[in-house]
Image: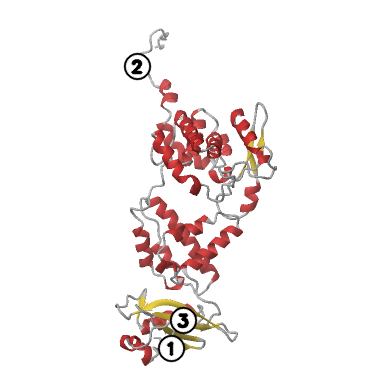
Amino acid sequence: MARKVSFSALESRSARLRLKIRRRPYSGPSLARGISLMYRRNKTNGTWVLKASTGSNSYWTKGFALADDFEDADEKNVLTFHQAQGAAKKLARSDDGASTGTAPITVEGALADYRTDLITGAANPYNADWPLLHLASVLKSKPVALLTSLELKKWRDGLLGTLAPSTINRLCGCLRAALNLAARHDKRLQNREVWEVGLVNLPDAQQARNVILSDDKVREFVAAAYGVDDKFGLFTDTLAITGARPSQARRLRVEDLHDHPVRPKLMMSKSAKGGSRKRVEKKQQRYSVPITPELAAKLKAAAKGRADHAPLLLQSDGSPWGDNPGASYHNDVKKIVAAIGVDPDATMYALRHSSIVRMLLLNVPIRLVASLHNTSVKMIERTYSKYITEHSDDVSRHALLQHVPPSGENVVALAG
């Protein structure tokens, strides 16, 4: 059992409240070689502060929990003097018991490191930025080593009613990835089970429905987008014709347009989905996607006078669409969906889903459909099979058994 250190000036609530409120922490007891506990007196609950040696005649400090000055300890965010000792040593030491030379990483710090890692791997940093929009400041500043599964579960469950369960699961996945990265680089973090349990996926959370639009509704969608502005309309038109993901379309360059008078096409960059290995190399690869002469003419006019390496599709202010184009057009799409009277769950991805189902219903070989949409046959069969039956009435109805043959047809008697 770990020895508890006494220190009368900080040990009791009454002793701490006799101290003067100030920003600079009060010195406390030494807990081990190079590790000591300090206390900052605040107007409200004071703060326990860890002071640890870097091993080079310097030290770092880190506030890690509230003191039980005005409320009872909960062993998570509010700690007694003796509970703070154990938490301080846990933060300062590696798994072999030695003091480390770096401050313990917080949840916000883990997300910052994850953002850098995503950028280095040519991935979208939005996956690291997104959780910050939903985390309270207390959880952001919490050292990862002191996280508990219960507080993470409460945070996850608190999002219900605000976000769809499937969205919550994706958000938790982003946070888990950041915490796992932190644990790989800091051997003090031996509590991986905390976020694996606390951020486990919500049960029976269906993914957002893949809304399929009729061709007429797709045309209305595109026309409404042009009504917002020409640049947004052209971006939407390109997605509707190619079935590409917005992240792919925004990477198109002027040189990717091949405006053949009869068979125009775009050389679309691959999505690099499925992990970070060779992500940059994948994004540099191009594959051919046919487009209509009408779209080719619009793209050629929009690109006139710009360099080959310049972005092909721009926003209304002339800027590129950026890493997260959805953030720019989210509200416009919601208004379009309401205006044309389609499923309110429809997003810009409805254009991609509709493109895939349209080709399948027109008997385009599934392997070719997969290639044109930069996905796999397995993914199409798994994701779109249930929609094909729903939208194939006109195609399959003529094959139904007719007990009474239509008039005018010859009836052939069976032998026997």
Which amino acid, mark 2?
His
Q: Which residue is disc 3 drawn over?
A: 50
Instruction: Say few, some or many: other residues with alpha carbon within 10 Å of mark 2 (under 14 / 14 to 19 / 20 or more).
Output: few
The image position of residue 401, as x and y in percent, is 38, 20
Rendered image quadrant of residue 208: top left
- Sequence-first disc among 3 and 1: 1
Q: Amino acid at mark 3?
A: Leu
Disc assigned to residue 28: 1
Residue closer to the observer: 322 or 405? 322
Label 3 environment density (alpha carbons within 10 Å; few <14, some 14–19, many ≥20):
many
Q: Earlier in the sequence, mark 3 or mark 2?
A: 3
Which residue sits at x=59%, y=43%? 314
Give how far across and how far down residue 190 sits, in percent.
47, 72
Residue 413 against residue 377 in the figure, above or below: above
N-terminal label among 2 and 1: 1
**Label 1 environment density (alpha carbons within 10 Å; few <14, some 14–19, many ≥20):** many
Q: CA distance from mark 3 to mark 2?
A: 84 Å
Residue furthest front in the image: 317
Instruction: Report the Cα–Cα distance between label 3 and label 1.
Output: 10 Å
> What residue does disc 2 label?
403
- Which element is circle 1 on? loop
Picture layout, residue 176 above or below residue 187: above
Q: For the point 40% across and 35% down, which residue is it?
A: 339
Percent coordinates x, y for residue 379 in the rendering? 50, 42
